[in-house]
Image (cartoon, rainbow, N blue to C red):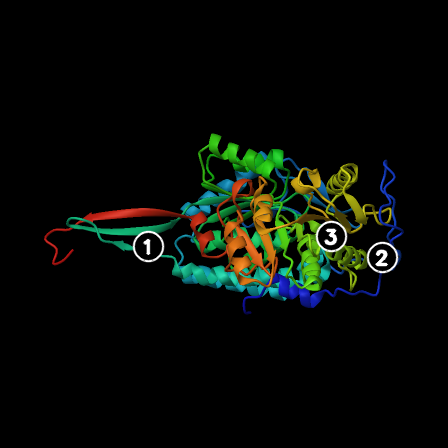
């Protein structure tokens, strides 16, 4: 399958129009103590669809076997549409991390994986990618059920990208090599690129399978073994694909998967003395804790992909209709639960009022409901904690005197559905313009000139991504070079090709995921210097 963009897949899957429309009762329906519900959608009244997939794997995957937690404990994973229990999953803790690390260490030191030819490793990864495609419907259903993202997004964009990522890294497996280095004197010098060993990986809940692929793909291509901790909110698809990896021929102990909680399983993995490398995707605050644990244990290297507050900048020459649609996608994609979401929408003052009105109209048309239903654009937030966090920020925006153009409340009385929310007249010092909300809340800010918007866009502790929308090549080049962000999308957004590196500046993390750069995270460079006796040439 050729490299494909998540954004292009989604644009073909989702339409700006919909058979269901939200109805607004006014510009600002906040009464000072609560947000008044004023949106409705017939999809909510039609009942919840029962997913056509069974939950078959709820145990930890350690040394090639599905096993209970050492403590025997389990915890519930919930359906965000209802808050009801989907399944009870093994609750791993420090003892289970120890078991998993021991299995990974044995597989690395004594097993066949690092000693296999790179070509054979690539064949296993390619077989796995084929199995992902074969089981795409079950995987998409599990991802939607456990996470709340739309089935259409999971099936048509994310699962194909998982397969694409593993094929990409399978292609790299037999192309990793060192160099022959000229040196002064009679010496033969070569560099070896060696697998780093046991890699600990901690993935988030917003894109469970994609983050699995971003982490596991390069680590396996380089010949490492892995202990992966899932997010406690979304463990189901990781166990399913763990089984597919065994079916593809991955030796026991190479990939170990532990579900559990951060303070127990996550902390144990980060501080484990026999883990050689750590990779984490999640919040900046948790990333600081992870970095500290890694440093205070065995000083293992850490790759961090953390939070963001990405600017999306619309210049006065932009096609406003296209800019509105792209800004809407940049923010509301995945229920707003995206680290690189364009959550600060800067719009030039000459087109600001027109943009705000059209952004409001687009948000009012956004269809929210059961993510298994056709035509739904937005499902629920992941859980009650995230739901309540988003609602607190909405209240903060109103209390800060930003204008609530639409949304601001809950949809229905079951599950974690939030109205698509748009604020205008947002100022830089408001919390909704500073903090990562991680929800369907668009903040629209006004600017006057290029120098001003560059300065304001960079005045944040984050630096993960940015978007620039303009017809001027000069403006695009100037701004993209001036923005302090790991990715700048020009007249597009959320383009996640397997070969494009992704990562942040400042407190958005360090290191890069995807592409050739991610291989460096899982390799060590060794210099081998051999004395030459009377060489014919040097």
Q: Are marks 3 and 1 in contact (CB under 8 Å)?
A: no
The N terminus lies in quadrant:
bottom right
Q: Are marks 3 and 2 in contact (CB under 8 Å)?
A: no
- Work out whether residue 132 can be spotted: no
Q: Residue 148 shows which numbered tag?
A: 3
Please say if 198 is above or below 214.
Answer: above
Residue named by callout 1: 178
- Work out whether residue 328 can be spotted: yes
Of the two numbered discs 3 and 2 in the rendering, the one whose residue sits closer to the viewer: 2
Residue named by callout 2: 22
Position of 441 with respect to 279 (left or right) is: right
Give coordinates of residue 42: x percent, y percent: 88, 59
Q: Residue furthest left?
A: 534
Marks 3/1: CA distance?
44 Å
Q: What is the secondary structure assignment of the residue under circle 3?
A: loop
Residue found at x 52% / y 60%: 474
Q: What is the secondary structure assignment of the residue under circle 1?
A: loop
Residue found at x 69% / y 43%: 437
Position of 114 with respect to 356 (left or right) is: left
Q: Between disc 3 and disc 2, whose residue precedes?
A: 2
Give coordinates of residue 442: x percent, y percent: 72, 49
Please say if 153 is above or below 255.
Answer: below
Residue 425: quarter of image: top right
């Amino acid at each position: 399958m050729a490299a494909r963009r998540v954004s292009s897949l989604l644009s073909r899957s989702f339409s700006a129009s919909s058979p269901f429309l939200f109805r607004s009762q006014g510009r600002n329906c906040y009464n000072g103590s609560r947000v008044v519900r004023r949106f409705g959608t017939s999809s909510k009244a039609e009942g919840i669809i029962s997913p056509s997939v069974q939950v078959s794997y709820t145990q930890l995957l350690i040394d090639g076997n599905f096993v209970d937690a050492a403590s025997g404990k389990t915890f519930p994973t919930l359906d965000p549409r209802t808050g009801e229990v989907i399944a009870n999953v093994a609750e791993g803790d420090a003892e289970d991390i120890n078991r998993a690390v021991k299995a990974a260490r044995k597989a690395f030191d004594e097993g066949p994986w690092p000693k296999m030819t790179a070509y054979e490793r690539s064949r296993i990864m390619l077989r796995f990618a084929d199995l992902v495609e074969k089981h795409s419907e079950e995987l998409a259903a599990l991802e939607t059920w456990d996470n709340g993202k739309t089935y259409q997004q999971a099936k048509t964009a994310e699962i194909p990208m998982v397969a694409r990522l593993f094929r990409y890294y399978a292609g790299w497996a037999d192309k990793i090599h060192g160099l022959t280095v000229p040196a002064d004197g009679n010496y033969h010098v070569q560099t070896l690129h060696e697998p780093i060993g046991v890699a600990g990986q901690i993935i988030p809940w917003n894109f469970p399978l994609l983050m699995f692929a971003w982490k596991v793909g390069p680590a396996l291509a380089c010949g490492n073994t892995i202990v992966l901790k899932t997010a406690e909110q979304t463990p189901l698809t990781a166990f399913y694909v763990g089984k597919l990896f065994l079916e593809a021929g991955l030796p026991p102990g190479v990939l170990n998967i532990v579900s559990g909680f951060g303070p127990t399983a996550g902390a144990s993995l980060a501080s484990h003395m026999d883990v050689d490398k750590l990779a984490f995707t999640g919040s900046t605050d948790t990333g600081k804790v992870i970095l500290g644990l890694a440093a205070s244990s065995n000083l293992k290297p850490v790759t961090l992909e953390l939070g963001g507050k990405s600017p999306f900048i619309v210049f006065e020459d932009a096609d406003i209709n296209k800019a509105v649609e792209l800004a809407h996608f940049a923010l509301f994609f995945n229920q707003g639960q995206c680290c690189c979401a364009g959550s600060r929408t800067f719009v030039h003052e000459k087109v600001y009022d027109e943009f705000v009105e059209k952004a409001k109209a687009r948000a009012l048309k956004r269809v929210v409901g059961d993510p298994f239903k056709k035509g739904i654009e937005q499902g629920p937030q992941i859980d009650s904690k995230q739901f309540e966090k988003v609602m607190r920020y909405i209240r903060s925006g109103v209390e800060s005197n930003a204008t609530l153009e639409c949304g601001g409340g809950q949809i229905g009385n079951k599950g974690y559905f939030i109205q698509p929310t748009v604020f205008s007249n947002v100022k830089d010092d408001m919390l909704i313009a500073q903090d990562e909300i991680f929800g369907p809340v668009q903040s629209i800010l006004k600017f006057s000139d290029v120098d001003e918007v560059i300065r304001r866009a960079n005045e944040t502790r984050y630096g993960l991504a940015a978007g620039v929308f303009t017809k001027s090549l000069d403006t695009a080049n100037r701004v993209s070079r001036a923005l302090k962000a790991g990715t700048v999308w020009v007249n597009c957004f959320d383009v996640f090709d397997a070969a494009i590196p992704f990562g942040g500046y400042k407190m958005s993390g360090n290191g890069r995921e995807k592409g050739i750069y991610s291989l460096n995270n899982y390799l060590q460079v060794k210099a081998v210097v051999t004395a030459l006796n009377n060489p014919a040439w040097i």
